[in-house]
Amino acid sequence: MGGCFSKPKPVEVKVEVVLPEKEREKEELSPNGKASPLAYKTNGTTRHYHHEERPIGLNPYTNPKDIVEASVCHVKDLENGQMREVDLGCGKALLIKQNGEYYAMGHKCPHYGAPLVKGVLSRGRVRCPWHGACFNIATGDLEDFPGLDGLPKFQVKIEKERVYIRASKQALQSQRRTKVMAKCIALSNYSTAITNILIIGAGPAGLVCAETLRQEGFSDRIVMCTSEKYLPYDRSKLSKSMDSQAEQIFLRSKEFFHMYDIEVLTETQVINVDTKNKTVVFKDGFRMEYNKLLIATGSTPKTLKCKGKELDNVFTIRTPEDANRVVKLASNRNVVIVGASFLGMEVAGYLCEKAHSVSVVELENIPFKKFLGEKVGLAIMKVFESNRVKFYMQTEVSELREQEGKMKEVVLKSGKVLRADVCVIGIGASPTTCFLKQSGVTIDAKGYIPVNKMMQTNIPGVFAAGDVVIFPLAFRNNKKVNVPHWQMAHMQGRIAALNMLAQGTEINTIPYLWTAMFGKSIRYAGNGEGFDDVIIQGDIEELRFVAFYTKNDEVIAVASMNYDPIVSKVAEVMASGKSIRKRDVETGDISWLTGKGS
């Protein structure tokens, strides 16, 4: 093991068990049924947090010099259900009125800085117009993802029919708030070969699981392990911002993990899981005993099966080094991308101004046909073609020809030969679950792990989340699906953590994804698998449209370009449990959805 934390040695570790009462008796036993070293005589008083007792952060108003108070509007300036971005002189806030009450919080989404005033206010929360994150208007807490932080909450008072906001200058400037978290509490001679929570995988699902446990007051040992050499990072940026260095896209700093006692074992690969004895074996032979386990290993890119697939300048984009090297080699050279997937098209869009030529090879006749439909896929294809990207559709690669050990040509089954100095493979991915074959954890024919709505596998105490799972999607009548989206991995990690603490929480979120190409964003919510019709409103040629994907008489997904916040609005309607009928969107009058009168 190495990286952020090298192989553990015997040390003093601070530990405190804070599981709910009904789980404590179970936790008194080790995975082998013997008296557990996890049930300790603590050198201090053990504290068990409940929601009404949770420690709160420092009062942001203790330093008078850090406080600003300003009159921001008249009480009649804001109607129920309205939001307004207001300036306090040293920063802005989002003022909200709902059900006759006023609320104020940060005005920018901590994820990518979207202006929340352009988002959707519904059911006591604001949904980001760009990527769908949701924030509770009373607390600022993050209720749906992506992102990791909530928003600062500000005081509102009414005086002489004026609305005043009192806020910390620091909070106004930061526009984010990390939820209070627990830490480990001291105990001597704790074996490093034993952990209460073991998380295999350090992507968004694993990270959010660890953070949620700490936010809920869990103060026993948490270990995350990853085969990569980095702390958790934003892998979605590898194809969108290929020049990024790993440190630039870390989700949390090294200091954060130390502060909250979340151990990260890097360059550490699990090769076997023994669920009967609750033990995992690492590649170097090290063994670790666990109490609860989360499997969040993500996916592995598929590779070509033809001759030349292992040549030096043939890449799958899996790590920051992969992305960085592709950019370097592509400069003023010929690039061939195999697969018009989201990753493949994002790479094509990023490289087209840097490379001499960019070619995309795809088996289908139109990019994104199965996901976005023919009309939307064709419109996107035209945008790429206008930016010098050449498409070779309805064909496959038969051979990668080499010269002096490097690939120089891509030979297609159609007979066409493409000059290539760099080849990027984007033909999909498979779940990374092969190490579980002897574990007893159920794996389906495609390698996915079936879980229930609480992210539990068939083995008690073993949970799974992220790209590796299929789960019941509530708004699609519990249809079992795999949703390999960044946002969904976050939520599944949170649900797994809550159920490790026996809170009985079921997942009930709407899938939300986005992609960006040539400065234009496509937003998507829902699950359009099996759609039988697409209703398009707007001007698809001008790339200002909304597309509703229907199955039978129901809208099951929506996509848009330059039509914010329509996708977030649809997501919020779906999240409320309401159905959107095909006839509601066929007329072209979507005022009922946007909240604007016709």
Image (cartoon, grey):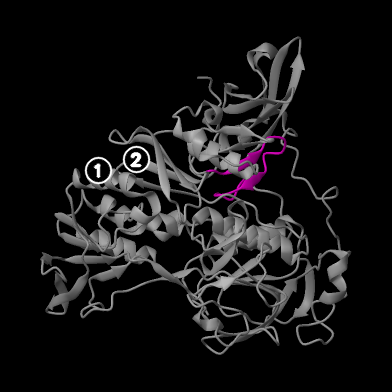
The residue beneath circle 2 is 520
Q: In the drawing, does residue 391 fall left or right of residue 245?
A: left
Q: Position of residue 261 (x, y in %)?
A: 67, 64
Q: In the drawing, does residue 446 fall left or right of residue 351?
A: right
Which residue: 75% across, 21% down? Answer: 157
SS assignment at label 2: strand
Which amino acid, mark 1? Answer: Val
User: Can residue 252 be seen at all in this image of the molecule?
Assistant: no
Q: Position of residue 352 (x, y in %)?
A: 21, 51
Which residue: 46% across, 69% down? Answer: 299
Q: Position of residue 120 (x, y in %)?
A: 57, 33
Which residue: 17% across, 48% down? Answer: 388
Q: Residues within 10 Å of mark 1 (few under 14, many from 20)?
A: some
Residue 432 falls within the magenta-colored stretch: no
- Ranked by sequence position, the earlier of labels 1 and 2 is 1
User: Disc 1 versus disc 2: distance between alpha carbons?
Assistant: 10 Å
Which sits in the foreground, 271 or 288? 271
Q: Main secondary structure of the magenta part?
A: loop
Which amino acid, mark 2? Answer: Lys
User: Can residue 376 be seen at all in this image of the molecule?
Assistant: yes
Which sits in the foreground, 419 or 552? 552
Q: Residues within 10 Å of mark 2 (few under 14, many from 20)?
A: few
Q: In the drawing, does residue 311 fall left or right of residue 494?
A: left
Q: Where does the magenta region start and end?
A: 132-149
The residue beneath circle 1 is 383
Determine whether 78 is above or below 342 in the image.
Answer: above
Is the residue under label 2 in contact with that under label 1 (CB below 8 Å)? yes
The label shown at residue 195 is none
Q: In the drawing, does residue 382 fall left or right of residue 283?
A: left
Determine whether 160 is above or below 566 in the image.
Answer: above
Determine whether 143 is above or below 436 in the image.
Answer: above
Determine whether 50 is above or below 407 in the image.
Answer: above
